[in-house]
Image (cartoon, grey):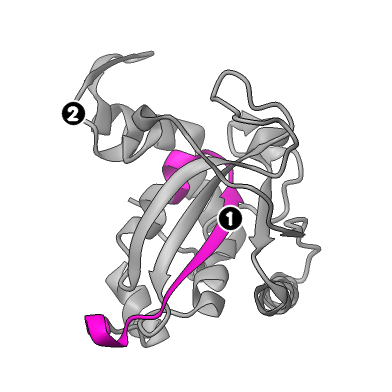
């Protein structure tokens, strides 16, 4: 993460300088997006949830029409919205319209949800820049943000959990089960395949 901080010129501002803003993105499994961004300098918190659909009060078992998404709260004096979106695009497979990695279906598609006209312009510019960098069509849409519904408590900070989880490889501590899932799903390998040296590494 820190090499990205240096490359982008990120710095932690003082509390007095803090300009708190939010960004909403969908990048497949929300556990992974949350994990990727919570460690980035300037990010205050990342929260897993659901958005983009019409269903009221969606749940993990009942969120048809919604994307799995993450709301990122950040200090824009330390990291800008443009920088976050640039990193987000490099943390996913922007060429896959059917889901992400081993997670298939509409809930796992990528998207950027713009909270205002400025974010929409910045996100569209970032998508155009990504297309130019890759030389292919980026299928990640820029959509107007609607209600962001916070996911159940057990989904928050899932990658840090200490509960014992039963996996295909047997019982594992939750944080280790998360790593097993992420590796088995091929997320990081595919991002490196798409983006090469520009890939944004996760945990």
Position of 155 relative to 18 (above/below):
above
Q: Which residue is mark 1?
A: 25
- The quarter in which the N terminus is drawn is bottom left
Mark 1 crowd level (few <14, some 14–19, many ≥20, 10 Å Cα):
many
Q: Residue at x 68, y 43 (%)?
A: 109
In the image, is 2 to the left or to the right of 135?
A: left
In the image, is 199 to the left or to the right of 46?
A: right
Position of 18 relative to 67 (above/below):
below
Q: Which one is nearer the viewer's eye here, 191 or 5?
A: 5
Tell me where residue 3 appears, x and y as whole percent. Answer: 32, 75
Question: In the image, which disc is placed on residue 145?
Answer: none
Residue range in magenta is 12-33
Q: Quadrant of residue 133?
A: bottom right
In the image, is 189 to the left or to the right of 62?
A: left
Q: Residue at x 62, y 20 (%)?
A: 62
Tell me where residue 125 appears, x and y as whole percent. Answer: 72, 79
């Amino acid at each position: 993460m820190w090499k990205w901080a240096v490359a982008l010129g990120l710095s932690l501002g003082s509390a007095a300088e803090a300009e708190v803003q939010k960004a909403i993105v969908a990048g497949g499994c929300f556990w992974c997006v949350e994990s990727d961004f919570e460690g980035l300098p300037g990010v205050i918190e990342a929260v897993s949830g659901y958005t983009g659909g019409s269903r009221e009060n969606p749940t993990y078992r009942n969120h048809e029409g919604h994307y799995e998404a993450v709301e990122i709260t950040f200090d824009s004096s330390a990291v800008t919205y443009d920088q976050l979106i640039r990193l987000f695009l490099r943390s996913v497979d922007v060429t896959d319209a059917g889901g992400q990695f081993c997670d298939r279906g509409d809930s796992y598609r990528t998207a950027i949800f713009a909270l205002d006209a400025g974010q929409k312009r910045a996100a569209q510019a970032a998508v155009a820049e990504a297309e130019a960098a890759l030389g292919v069509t980026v299928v990640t849409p820029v959509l107007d943000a609607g209600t962001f519904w916070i996911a159940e408590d057990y989904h928050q900070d899932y990658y840090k959990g200490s509960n014992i989880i039963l996996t295909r490889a047997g019982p594992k501590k939750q944080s280790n089960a998360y790593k097993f899932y992420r590796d088995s799903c091929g997320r990081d390998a595919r991002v490196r395949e798409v983006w090469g040296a520009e890939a944004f590494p996760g945990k």
